[in-house]
């Protein structure tokens, strides 16, 4: 079910609705969405990717069995937002160009949050923001991590139920039985 959640987030970040929201904030669209794998932490070994970028990380999950062959989980989803380099403030004071880049990054955080919060699907509940932090150890490249919580429902049992209802008496508890 994580695949459905990932796809929903990625598609929403690339949707026309998202483009309109980014335009409202005076921003360019998110150029890259990917599954988080420490890309910005190991840039020298990664292929170049366009910015701004959003990396989707599935962090902690509490999984509980709901019944036979199905479970539900409370998922923590972190979005890592990487903007264009702000530049160093070492040996100089902040100037209007650097200030605008910083404000642009903060607008990106607000715009992505506006786009993502409230995404829902039959497989998961609405994404609810639960935290935000600046990951500031990247040589002038700002990275914010926005955390969301959602309940993920395993639909495989529902699919099995639909299959058995459609097939009628020919299926019983996953075994093939003879019709009389």
Image (spheres, rainbow, N blue to C red):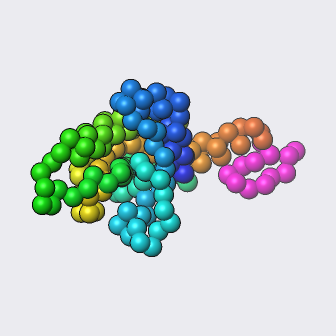
The residue that appears at 43% across and 38% down in the rendered structure is 28
The x, y position of residue 8, in whole percent, is 52, 41
Task: Report if residue 173 lies within the magenta region.
Answer: yes
Residue 64 in view of the camera: no
Q: Residue 21, how many percent across, how many down?
A: 42, 29
Which quadrant of the view contains residue 176?
bottom right
Relative height, residue 140 to residue 32 (above, below): below
Q: Nearer the viewer, residue 80 or 127?
A: 80
The residue closer to the viewer here, 16 or 8, is 16
Q: How many marks?
A: 0
Drawn side of residue 173 relative to residue 60, left or right? right
> Quick check: 168 left or right of 144?
right
On the image, the x and y values in percent for residue 78 come to 35, 51
Q: Position of residue 140 (x, y in %)?
A: 26, 58
Q: In front: 167, or 135?
A: 135
Magenta span has 84? Answer: no
Tell which residue pokes out farthest to the bottom in this image.
45
Quadrant holding the C terminus? top right
Magenta residue span: 169-180
Residue plotted at (21% across, 58% down): 88
Nearer to us in this view, 172 or 122: 122
Residue at position x 70%, y 54% in the image = 174
Residue at 36% across / 35% down in the picture?
111
Residue 155 visible in the shown view: yes
């Amino acid at each position: 079910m994580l695949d459905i959640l990932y796809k929903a987030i990625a598609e929403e970040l690339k949707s026309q609705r998202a483009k309109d929201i980014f335009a409202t904030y005076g921003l360019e669209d998110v150029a890259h969405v990917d599954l988080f794998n420490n890309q910005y932490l190991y840039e020298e070994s990664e292929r170049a990717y366009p910015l701004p970028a959003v990396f989707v990380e599935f962090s902690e999950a509490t999984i509980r069995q709901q019944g036979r062959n199905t479970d539900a989980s409370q998922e923590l989803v972190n979005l890592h937002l990487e903007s264009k380099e702000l530049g160093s403030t070492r040996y100089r004071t902040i100037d209007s160009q650097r200030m605008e880049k910083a404000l642009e990054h903060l607008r990106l955080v607000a715009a992505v949050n506006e786009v993502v919060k409230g995404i829902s699907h039959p497989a998961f509940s609405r994404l609810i923001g639960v935290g935000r932090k600046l990951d500031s150890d990247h040589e002038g490249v700002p990275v914010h991590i926005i955390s969301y919580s959602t309940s993920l429902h395993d639909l495989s049992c529902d699919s099995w139920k639909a299959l058995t209802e459609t097939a009628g008496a020919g299926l019983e508890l996953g075994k093939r039985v003879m019709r009389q």
